[in-house]
Amino acid sequence: QVQLEESGGGLVQPGGSLRLSCVASRITFSIYTLGWYRRAPGQQRELVATITRAGGTNYADSVKGRFTISRDNPKNTVYLQMNSLKPEDTAVYYCNAVFLNSDLWGQGTQVTVSS
């Protein structure tokens, strides 16, 4: 069974940092475009960042300069380094993997930014 599993969420103070990880199993990881999305309470899910199989990246304007997405293909893992966190970054963060008609999602990990 194909699986994406996120980890690394938690409670952090404003200005702090967290690194999210997402490990994939039972897929040819290197061919997938990978992404992180988030859903804040009462909001729709939104794109945070994506990384193509060639390593090209794209970020939401709200996180540019603060978040960095990266991938480690031998480890089947995609990361989201989040710095200078703000209360408005509070959300459930989801990992996504897409290739042709294969669109995979993890269960999500909670990130709470609060003092």
Image (spheres, rainbow, N blue to C red):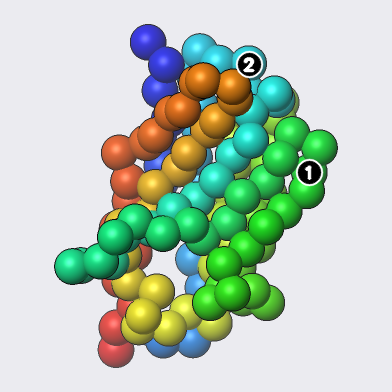
Q: Tell me if residue 36 comes above or below residue 14 in the rendering.
A: above
Rendered location of residue 81, percent (x, y): 59, 62
Look at 20% across and 67% down and name the residue there.
41
Rendered location of residue 30, percent (x, y): 70, 25
Q: Which residue is situated farthest in the left direction here?
A: 42
Look at 70% across and 23% down and name the residue there.
31
Q: How many marks?
A: 2
The residue to which callout 1 is attached is 55
Left or right for 107, reference 46: left
- Whichever of callouts 2 and 1 sits on the residue coming sooner in the sequence is 2
Question: Dot 1: what SS?
Answer: loop
Left or right for 35, reference 94: right
Q: Tell me if residue 61 comes above or below residue 21 in the rendering.
A: below
Amino acid carrying label 2: it is Thr
Rendered location of residue 54, percent (x, y): 81, 37
Question: Dot 2: what SS?
Answer: loop
Amino acid carrying label 1: it is Gly
Q: Tell me if residue 21 comes above or below residue 16 in the rendering.
A: above
* Front-lying residue, 10 or 1: 1
Q: Tell me if residue 106 comes above or below residue 3 in the rendering.
A: below
The residue to which callout 2 is attached is 28
How many angstroms separate mark 2 from mark 1 (CA)?
16 Å
Asked whether residue 42 is in view, the answer is yes
Look at 37% across and 36% down and name the residue there.
106
Look at 29% across and 83% down and name the residue there.
114
